[in-house]
Amino acid sequence: DAGVIQSPRHEVTEMGQEVTLRCKPISGHNSLFWYRQTMMRGLELLIYFNNNVPIDDSGMPEDRFSAKMPNASFSTLKIQPSEPRDSAVYFCASSPPAGFSHEQYFGPGTRLTVT
Amino acid sequence: GENVEQHPSTLSVQEGDSAVIKCTYSDSASNYFPWYKQELGKRPQLIIDIRSNVGEKKDQRIAVTLNKTAKHFSLHITETQPEDSAVYFCAASNALTGGGNKLTFGTGTQLKVEL
């Protein structure tokens, strides 16, 4: 398996623009997680899905952030409108069904810069 | 919700010495405690994990101990090598609940192994 795939790897955009980050989890994994990493706040869980259903979105900063998982092999995280404080590395991770390993496998991340 | 504290935030050791990183958690229902290593510019990767039904686990030069009563767990790296230099994150989870495996991460420890 290719592992968790994220795109784009780097994104530079201007304040006010819409940003869409994409993630393809490992085949067979049924949980998907979106994290944000900054020097100041560390690694924060934004939202996670189980069997394509959002389970906990308490980490989503505000209404400008939204996430979807239309099927088992694809998820998006959208920021609209983007602000400079959204600059961070965004990781997607997936994990297999309960009863198997509890390990979360991280993607390579998307480095977002909002100017 | 769960709160994980991690210390120290930075740790510098001489090559060949041991390194110890400590974490405490708040939720007595947590039962799964992984450690992730993140090299500069890379994704976090699981290096070892422990479940609440064991007190210690070893894998070559790394070991993790868990004290459920005190709600703390530690990572021990022996015979440190320059390639051990990275940021290490502890995490905690209640892995028995349905809906995926939500991890709460500590704030990370920057380990530097000096020649």
Image (spheres, coloured by chain):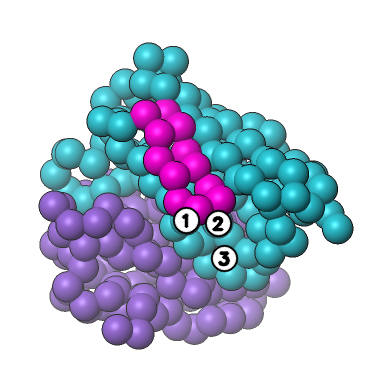
Q: Which residue is mark 1?
A: B47
Residue drawn 61% across and 36% down? B21
**Chain painted cyan:** B
Determine the CA span between mark 1 and mark 3: 21 Å
Determine the CA span between mark 3 and mark 2: 16 Å
Q: Position of residue A108 (x, y in %)?
A: 49, 74
Numbered disc 1: secondary structure: strand
Q: Is residue B52 above or below residue A50?
A: above
**Chain painted purple:** A
Q: Are marks 3 and 2 in contact (CB under 8 Å)?
A: no
Q: Position of residue A93 (x, y in %)?
A: 37, 64
Would you say the magenta stretch is mainly helix, strand or loop? strand
Q: Amino acid at mark 1?
A: Ile
Quarter where residue B93 is shown: top left
Q: Which residue is mark 2?
A: B37
Residue drawn 58% across and 81% down? A10
- Which chain's residue wears label 2? B
- Please tell me if label 1 and label 3 are on a single chain: no
Q: Amino acid at mark 2?
A: Lys
Numbered disc 2: secondary structure: strand
| Residue A61 seen in this snapshot | no
Quarter where residue A85 is shown: bottom right
Q: Which residue is mark 3?
A: A89
Q: Amino acid at mark 3?
A: Val
What residue span does the magenta drawing correspond to?
B55-66
Q: Position of residue A1 (x, y in %)?
A: 29, 84
Image quarter hosting the C terminus of chain B? bottom right
